[in-house]
Image (spheres, rainbow, N blue to C red):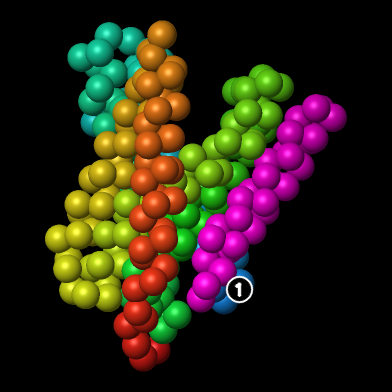
Amino acid sequence: MSVTALLLVCLAGASAGVWVAYLRWKDKRRPEPLTILILATAAGVVSVGAALLGYNVLDGLGRAATWSTLMGPWRDAIPAALAIGLVEETAKLLPILPIALTSRHFDEIWDGPVYLGAAGIGFALAETLYLLVGGDVGTLDGIVRAVIAPITHAVFAAPTGLGLAHAVLYARWWALPLGLGVASLAHGAYDLFLAQPGFQPAASAVVGVLWIWLLFAARELVQRPRVPRSG
């Protein structure tokens, strides 16, 4: 590995740490145990394997979802974008399900976006390292991805986390597929706009709108009372 690549790996790791600290700061009113938050981040790292498995399944079905497909005609790019969003957002969700279902610390609505956000940060770190080791990104793209990807993936995962919290704490099980659907759609739209020439500002707008919504929603969500749980 070259010195530049090694520095980019270090930057990606440091950036992930900073964003996890930011996430914990946003949860400062009733913070989750640091050990579980780190576990959720590590789970996000591992979840990249689930995403790769999902892509292999799609490839076997003849429905490859690749960056080159996103850059092609809209009739091919849109289904590919939706598939990418669903695969990656589902991958982030899977390792957080055991925490949400069994941990007594998962007892607030805001815990959903926090834990899924941590998984998103871990996912972004693993994805960036995978691309850097494979030599699939240049230096500038590597820097941008290392800094921006963690919070982008965390923001995309927030609707899933909110749906998960409603499902687990209030038995509103319909909220989980709804949240996952919104997250997948936003993620897919972002990738589609980012890949299509001339639509990059729209990609930024997707992340910006979702992040602003989350910042305003957080003010109310952190005030919600805890739901006592055993376990």
Tell me if residue 167 is in the magenta stretch.
Answer: no
Magenta stretch in the rendered image: 1-30
Please report the residue visible at 36 percent of the width from the left and 63 percent of the height from the top: 220
How many labels, in total? 1
Residue furthest to the bottom: 230
Q: Position of residue 28 (x, y in %)?
A: 56, 69
Please report the residue visible at 41 percent of the width from the left and 84 percent of the height from the top: 104
Q: Which residue is mark 1?
A: 35
Residue 148 vs 106, above or below: the answer is above
Please report the residue visible at 43 percent of the width from the left and 19 percent of the height from the top: 201
Choose top left, top right, bottom left or bottom right for residue 169.
bottom left
Screen quadrant of the N terminus:
top right
Q: Position of residue 37 (x, y in %)?
A: 55, 67
In the image shown, does 133 or 121 lie closer to the viewer? 121
Q: Position of residue 71 (x, y in %)?
A: 38, 13
In the image shown, does 34 or 102 lie closer to the viewer? 34
Please report the residue visible at 47 percent of the width from the left and 43 percent of the height from the top: 153
Q: Secondary structure at mark 1?
A: helix
Residue furthest to the right: 3
Residue type at the position of mark 1: Thr
Screen quadrant of the C terminus:
bottom left
Determine whether, in the image, residue 167 is placed left or right of residue 56: left
Q: Position of residue 40 (x, y in %)?
A: 51, 63
Residue 77 vs 208, above or below: the answer is above
Residue 48 seen anywhere in this rendered image of the structure: no
Choose top left, top right, bottom left or bottom right for residue 132.
top right
Choose top left, top right, bottom left or bottom right for residue 170.
bottom left
Tell me if residue 27 is in the magenta stretch.
Answer: yes
In the image shown, does 68 or 34 lie closer to the viewer? 34
Is the stretch drawn in magenta largely helix, strand or loop? helix
